[in-house]
Image: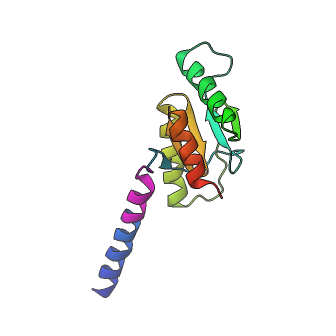
Amino acid sequence: MAAALFGGYRWWQGQEAEAAAAAPSPNGFVQVEMPDGAPRNTVLVLAPPNCPSEQAQRAESLIAALDGQGIPVKRGSGIDFEVANPTPEQIAGIDRAVAVFRAGAPAVFVNGMAMSNPTASQAAAEYRRTRL
């Protein structure tokens, strides 16, 4: 009986942690596993390269706005994860990152947080909130 109660307690703690990780920040970003090569304290903006689409144009505008505020920005077009023996938390973070990426460009990643198509003010606020 005690083992069942303890197991239930541990399961409930895991559920609460997952809900907290999936809850958006005040700026609308969700906690994710960062893609390989994403530098710390830099906003990673992902969108199709050399594309005249509306999504790519929004990405270029976002990059220019962040750069104009002195916020470090890196542009990319895809994500990759190389995690040996991932924990359940890492798998959930990767799943959230992929969901953001698939939601449409620009997908923006910063310091363990991500959002699809944020405004420049949202991205700048999240950068400042999470910067070390």
Read off the magenta span: 16-25
Residue at x 48% of width, y 52% of height? 92
State the predominant SS element of the stretch in magenta. Answer: helix
Residue at the front extreme, as displayed: 69
Q: Position of residue 114 (x, y in %)?
A: 53, 44
- In the picture, measured across the screen, residue 39 lies left or right of residue 104, that is right
Residue at x 30% of width, y 81% of height? 5
Residue at x 50% of width, y 31% of height? 117
- Pick the residue in front: 8 or 16: 16
Residue at x 58% of width, y 54% of height? 130
Please state, as top left, top right, bottom left or bottom right, where the N terminus lies in the image. Answer: bottom left
102 in magenta: no
Residue at the left extreme, as displayed: 1
Q: Position of residue 28 (x, y in %)?
A: 44, 44
- Pick the residue in front: 44 or 67: 67
Residue 42 picture quarter: top right
Visible in this render: residue 79?
Answer: no
- Pick the residue in front: 38 or 58: 58
Q: Position of residue 119 (x, y in %)?
A: 50, 33
Residue 71 picture quarter: top right
> How many marks do you count on the picture?
0
Please state, as top left, top right, bottom left or bottom right, where the C terminus lies in the image. Answer: bottom right
Residue at the top extreme, as displayed: 52
Visible in this render: residue 91?
Answer: yes
Coloring basis for residues: rainbow
Residue 64 picture quarter: top right
Q: Is residue 98 above or below residue 5?
A: above
- In the picture, measured across the screen, residue 67 lies left or right of residue 33, that is right
